[in-house]
Structures are given as structure tokens and as C-alpha cells.
Amino acid sequence: MADNNRDPDIHRIDELELSGFSRSITEIEWLLLILVLLYFVLPGMAIENSLGVVISMVAFAVFVLGFHYLNFFTLPARWKLAIETWVMILFLTWVLWNTGKAGSPLLNLYILVIVASALTLGKLITLLELTLIAAVYFYLNYFLGAVDVFSLAGFSDFMTRFAPFLIIAYVTTMLAADIKRSKDLLRLLSETDEMTSLQNKRSFNETLSKEIKKAARYSRKFSILLIDADNLKEVNDGYGHGAGDQLIKVLAGTMRESLRTSDIIARIGGDEFVVLLPEADHKHALEAGERIRSAAANTSFDREGERINMSVSIGIASYPDDGEGLEEIMENADRALYKSKKTGRNRVTRYTRAGREPAGTEPG
């Protein structure tokens, strides 16, 4: 019954996302370099320091190559993306200084930096970089001799030039935020059972893998309860699948009310549930299992004027006594669950090592 294949770590998804961002910024960096190079080679373009521009292009190309292709930094991270955008601003500012300062036709290349930052680094970093770009503009404009840079006329000129930057930064950060919200919602849906709003099998396996690591590191115990509804098939056959779905929902609510807020419940199959009890040994797991069993046995629900009862069978395995890995613990809990169902259902059984009969509790 248990899924023995570990799902990919959620951090792997984040790494893939960051890798995609890194590739996008790399392409933007090359595009920026190509546009500066085209400006440099076109005839009639004003360049005050040709050698300085060439050196800056070579240095920028070396930076991009080293950052992305020579494995100086093997793992993607947001702080690395931030460094790249700041280097892009530095490179472009130097180019503007030598191609007309605030009057350079390359001024609008700052838009590439803003887009890259808004898509990958969020509103705060984008706002900081936009502020820096505005400060650079004022600085460059001052050295052009525009003495009215702080006058009303100067402010109007600034807003005329920077309105596109502000609009692009605002729109792009909104789009990035919408994408992030959609991604978070999709992730939540991928980890949640639609009917009960509990964790699903994939999400639970990931949670259990993390709990095993934490328990091993800090020498802690935990227990697993595998829970199976005893009469779902009979309810489906006698009252229809709608009644069966209602039974699953009522059972999920009953388990929530019977457990601690720190306990984690997941639905891993049609009528199969699993519970993770952090820092709980066999004794506490048996007590929790009995609470669930008793609550389920004393719970019923109405379906078209008829009362439908339910019961559950439960199997228990604990770490580290009954296994040291996800597969072993789930298999042993499954063996205990099988024993519960084989010996009459509506009971709790804990797994013990070979040579001893599984111990459990029967309904009173």
C-alpha cells in the first residue's frame, strides 16, 4: 500500500526555478553586451573613450563567462542574481559616461536591468535599483552642465525620461507577483487532497522524509499510524459514492479533532489515511490510535434520512524501533494495519519485530 519511492525534494523545484531565472538573466546580459557593441561599431556614434568602452565590454563578457560557464558558482541563488543586476548597472553606467552621459541613446538599456530585476528579485530590490538608476541619471546630467537639474524644468525632464522606467518596473513587478501567487497556488494544490484538504501522498512522503532526517539528527522518536476505513465499499454499494465521499470527509474531520495540532494527517488513497506523530513513541501512538478508533466508532452521519456508522482499522510503526527509513517504517505500519483488518477490524495494532506477535487494542 505504501509508496516506496521518495518524491523529489521541494528545494529541487526552487533550484530549477532559479536555474531558469539565471538563464534568462544570462541572455539579457548578452543582449546588453551586443547592443553596446553595435553602438560602438556603428559609424558616427559619439564615444569619448573608445579604449575604456572596449575594456569594459571585455570585462563584462569575462564576468558573464565566469559567473555562468566556468563553474565559479555552481548553484543558483537569488543573491547571485542580484549581483548580476548590480554589475549590469555598473557596466551600463560606465558606457553611458563615455557615450554622452545622460544624453546617451543607450540610456534606455537600463530597462533591461529593471525587467530582469522585477522578474527575479521582487519589488524591494527593483525599487532600490530604480532609485540607483535615477541617482545615476542626476549625476550624469549634472556633469553635462545641466544646472537646472534640480529645478522644475529639470524635474519635468527627469519625469519625461523616467516615466517609461517607472511604468515598466510597476507592471513587471505586478506580473511577477501574479506569477508567484499562481505558482504558490499550484504548489498548494499539488500537495493537497482535494476532497479533505489534507496533505496528499506526495506531500506526506516529503514531510516524512524530512522528519526522519530531523529525528536521526536529534535522536528523537516519532510514530506512523496507517488508517483504513472498514466499511467504505459497503457504504458505496448501499448508498452510492456520494455517501462514500461524505464518509471520507467525516472521518477526516474526526481525525483532526482527535489529534494534536502538531500531528500531520494525509489521505494517501481512497479510504486510506496516514498520520505522522512527531516525538511520539509506541505508547503515545497507541493512545492516539485508540482515540481515533473510538471517535470513529462513535461517529455517524445522516444520508437521506438514514444513519450511517463507520469504523477504522489502524496499524502503528515507530522510529527508530520499527525502521530507520521511509520504506521500512511504512511497510511495517502496513503489516500492522493488515493484522488489524485480518483479526476483525475496528482495532489498533502496533508492529513489533519478528518473533513477537503484533500487540494492539480491541474495541471495548
Image: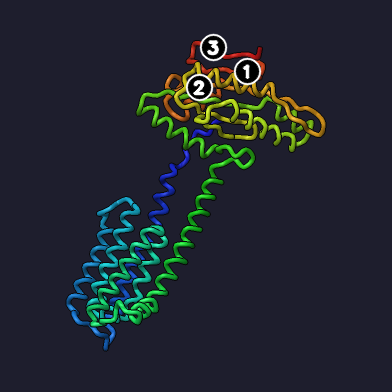
For residue 1, above or below residue 82: above
| Distance between the alpha carbons at the discs numbered 3 and 1 | 15 Å
Tell me whether the residue at label 2 lies in contact with that at label 1, contact meaning CB atoms closer than 8 angstroms: no
Report the side of 292 relative to 303 (left or right): left
- Give the residue number, with chain letter if any, for mark 1: 347
Element at badge 3? loop
Q: Which residue is at the front of the view, 46 or 133? A: 133
Element at badge 1? loop
At label 1, which amino acid type do we have?
A: Arg
Given the current orientation, which residue lies at the most extreme right position?
Answer: 305
- Give the residue number, with chain letter if any, for mark 3: 357
Please tell me which residue is depicted at 30% across the width and 51% down the height of the picture.
Answer: 74
* Number of other residues with Cα within 10 Å of mark 3, as a class: few under 14, some 14 to 19, many 20 or more: few
Image location of residue 32, percent across then percent down: 32, 71
Image location of residue 195, percent across then percent down: 64, 40
* Number of other residues with Cα within 10 Å of mark 2, as a class: few under 14, some 14 to 19, many 20 or more: many
| Distance between the alpha carbons at the discs numbered 2 and 3 | 14 Å
Please tell me which residue is depicted at 53% across the width and 21% down the height of the picture.
Answer: 316
Element at badge 2? strand
Please tell me which residue is depicted at 44% across the width and 19% down the height of the picture.
Answer: 321
Image location of residue 37, percent across then percent down: 28, 77
Report the side of 309 relative to 329 (left or right): right
| Distance between the alpha carbons at the discs numbered 2 and 1 | 15 Å
Q: Which residue is at the front of the view, 103 or 43? A: 103
Q: Which residue is at the front of the view, 102 or 282? A: 102
- Give the residue number, with chain letter if any, for mark 2: 317
